[in-house]
Every structure is written in structure tokens, then in C-alpha cells.
Amino acid sequence: MAYWLVKSEPHKYSWDDMVRDGRTIWDGVRNHTAAINLRAMKVGDKAFFYHSNEGKEIVGIVEIVREHYLDPKDAAQRFPAVDVAPVEKLKNPVTLAAIKAEPALAEMELIRQSRLSVAPVRDSEWKHILKMAG
């Protein structure tokens, strides 16, 4: 199993929206590196759900429930989408400021490539963030 981080602006699609829907398509990704990451996701992989711009915090965990397929909103049919479902809300959200303050997370893609909307998370980073979340 691999771990990931997916970002969404809460005014566009929030954790509460994810829970309400029970499952959603993760689409609209047009960055080539993020698209490569979507294509690498496998059913059963887990991802942190990160509220970007507003809040700037990891708020929950989702599971990949359908591997990549063509994004139906992409007229050129070049970019992928995946389906995700909520697993659990974090007991305590983990803020970007808290992540940046942790030396063990200094190489996390969220920090290194801050504009990337879909990024891998190393096993050690995953475990560390779960501890921070309580």
C-alpha cells in the first residue's frame, strides 16, 4: 500500500462534502507531476485529505476505491482521475505550520513542492502525521 496527500480548497470541496457524498471522483488535476501521481495510485492506497488555501491542514483520510481513468471533464482526454472514499476524520487536524515545524517532515512533498495538488507521502511521514493527529 502506498500513501498520498490530496488537496482541495474547502469552499470548492471540503471534508464534510466528502463525508456527505461517501465517494467522489478526484478530477480536475492538470499538473503533469500530480497526474503521474494519480496514475500511480492503486485501489486500497490511503491519502491524507488536505484543506488548501483556507485552513491549510490535514483533516482526514481517504481511500482510493477506483484506479485512474480518463477525467470526464478533460476535453483533450489526457489527464486522469481516481475515485476516493472517506475513511476517517483526524481527531486533531494537522496544520501546515505544525508540519513545517517538524524536522522529521522537512522533506515532505507538501513542503518541497507546495503547489502540487496530489503528492506521495513516505511511510515514516504518514506515521508521524498520524501521531501528531492523536
Image: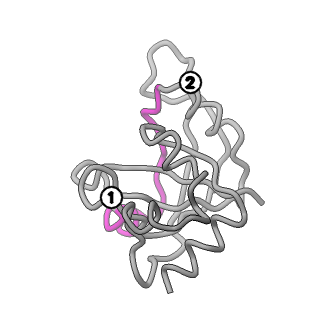
The type of residue carrying mark 1 is Lys
Q: Residue 4, position in %: x, y?
A: 61, 54
- Residue positioned 49% across, 12% down in the render: 76
The type of residue carrying mark 2 is His
- Residue positioned 49% across, 49% down in the render: 111
Read off the magenta span. Answer: 15-30
Dot 2, crowdedness within 10 Å: few (<14), some or many (≥20)? few
Q: Residue 66, position in %: x, y?
A: 64, 49
- Residue positioned 43% across, 65% down in the render: 58
86 with respect to 17 (left or right) = right
Front-lying residue, 70 or 50: 50
21 with respect to 120 (left or right) = left
Was residue 133 drawn as part of the magenta stretch in this picture?
no
Instruction: Give the mark nearest the N terminus, 2 or 1.
Output: 2
Q: Which residue is mark 2?
A: 32
Q: Secondary structure at mark 2?
A: helix
Dot 1, crowdedness within 10 Å: few (<14), some or many (≥20)? some
Q: Which mark is residue 56?
A: 1
Query: Is 134 above or below relative to 95?
Result: below
Query: Is 37 above or below relative to 62?
Result: above
C-beta proximity under 8 Å, tags 2 and 1: no
- Residue positioned 67% across, 58% down in the render: 3
Q: Residue furthest right?
A: 1
